[in-house]
Amino acid sequence: MFISAKRHEREKQELLDASNRLTEAILKNTEQGLFLLDGRDKIQPQVSQSLAALFRRQDFGNLSFEKLIAPIVTAKVLTVARNYVGGLLSGGPRAEAAESNPLRDVEVRLPKADGTGDAAHYSFEFDPIENSRDPRLWLVRVTDITLRVQTERELEDLRAQIQTQGEMLRSVLQVGGARLAAFLQRTDASMKTINLVLKKPAREEEAFRAKLEETLEEVDRVRRDAAAFKLSALEGAARQFEDSLHDLRSRSSLSGSEFLPLAVKLDQLYGQFAFL
């Protein structure tokens, strides 16, 4: 009986040692950031080594989830995370909470020594752990999905380019090269006029209003021509530019600084025209 009890304890200890070695190997070698979050919103001591690289910090002791992500996300994302994790820890339906996770794609800004930051995308997934001592224990998995997000965006850009190319080909087939060439010449002239008008010096309210109306006339011409040729990408860029101009027109006063954001809209319009 005594020998059997000693053997039983030895075997239990061997199993425990094997389990600990397995846990250590996983925490050391996995690329995911792994940690346990308890019911008091505290990160447990054992974390995976990759967590330090993902968050560019070494100390995770006595840290809440909110404090972990606060330095690398926007205030809006932080509010979403606070509400979601608060719901998890409040003891609601665990399966539903994990399924409705809004943190599967979070844009983060990782600080650098020179004061700038690297942009990345992280996915946070929460799996409930059955534990009699703390029934609200969660395994949190953090994955760097930046490459996947970039690939998806590149594919979306490629689809948009293919759509634009298809529209161009249809236009050429339907209206002929001569009419399309005339359209390109008119649009090119309008683009140059817009650029010149926006560069005109102005100080008085009347001069700003005049610049606004001249620009609006040319942008409207580009939009109507693009619509006639069923070139939706160019038409859409012109419409966005036009909306910004209408917004300025509705203001009670104008200044030079209010024209600065138009440069972005002009670049977008130029980009579509250059592609065309």
Image (cartoon, rainbow, N blue to C red):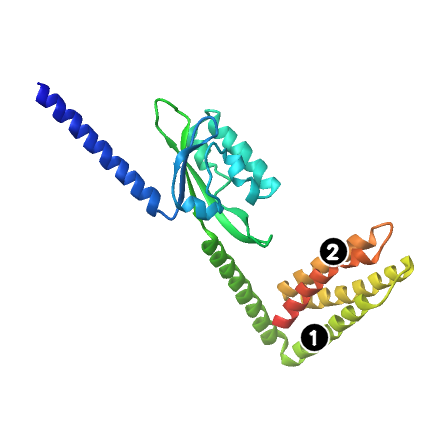
- Residue at the outermost bottom position: 178
Residue for point 72% across, 74% down: 188
Q: Position of residue 178 (x, y in %)?
A: 66, 81
| Residue 34 visible in rendering | yes
Residue 101 left/right relative to 224: left
Mark identifier at residue 183: 1
Q: CA distance from mark 2 to mark 1?
A: 23 Å
Q: How many marks?
A: 2
Q: Secondary structure at mark 1?
A: helix
Quick check: 266 left or right of 90? right
Residue shown at 34% from the left, 22% from the top: 132
* Amino acid found under the numbered disc labelled 1: Phe
209, above or below 182, in the image: above
Q: Say above or below: 183 vs 262.
A: below
Residue at the image point whose x is 80% and y is 64% from the top: 215
Amino acid on which the number 2 mark rests in the picture: Asp
The structure residue drawn at horizontal position 59% and vertical position 71%, both measured from the top left corner, is 168
Q: Which mark is residue 243?
A: 2
In which quadrant is the N terminus drawn? top left
Can the viewer see residue 229? no
